[in-house]
Amino acid sequence: MAPDFTAKNQHGQPVTLSALRGAPVVLVFYPYAFTGICTGELAAIQQQLSDFRSTGARVLALSTDTIFSLRVFADQQGFDFDLLSDHWPHGAIAEAYGAFDTTAGCALRGSFVLDADGTITWKILNQIGEARDIAEHLVALTG
């Protein structure tokens, strides 16, 4: 089972993972807003968002940035999915998933696909400088 959590999105609204049961969820941990690889990965999600949504999945992207930073980041980039703040306790959600770099103080590039029951069915964990192929996430969702 995926560790449950509640975090605020870029609009300050709380999102609780267990409340999303009944549909798949894609969790995407990323190190920092406004950085090259992170922006590229999230832009790829935005470009394929209709494909994610056609599977019934909800995409949640998490970083240790504050909700205020995430709001500006989402607005500037036109992201139409939840950016969740794992700011305090700092990195606790990423740590629960084994996706926190204690030396750098930020999330690694970890992705987790959860089925409708909240079970992790697929995951990938890359280091901070290693980009992920977002298309792999869709393959994991659709089998």
Image (cartoon, rainbow, N blue to C red):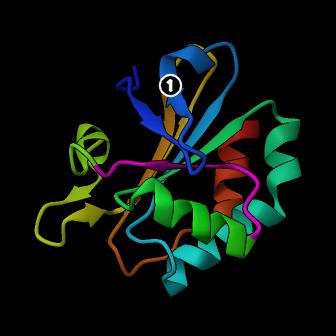
Q: Nearer the viewer, residue 58 or 131?
A: 58
Res 17 seen here: yes
83 left or right, relative to 30: right
Q: Nearer the viewer, residue 98 or 143?
A: 98
32 left or right, relative to 105: right
Q: Which residues are magenta?
A: 78-87
Res 133 seen here: no
The residue positioned 51% from the left and 40% from the top of the image is 122
Q: Position of residue 69 (x, y in %)?
A: 48, 66
Q: Quadrant of the C terminus?
A: top right
Magenta stretch: includes residue 136: no
Magenta stretch: includes residue 85: yes
Q: Quadrant of residue 7?
A: top left
Q: Quadrant of the N terminus?
A: top left
Question: Circle 1 — which element?
Answer: helix
Up the image or down, 16 lies above or below 100; here it is above
Would you name the residue on which mark 1 appears?
A: 17
Q: Nearer the viewer, residue 139 or 92?
A: 92
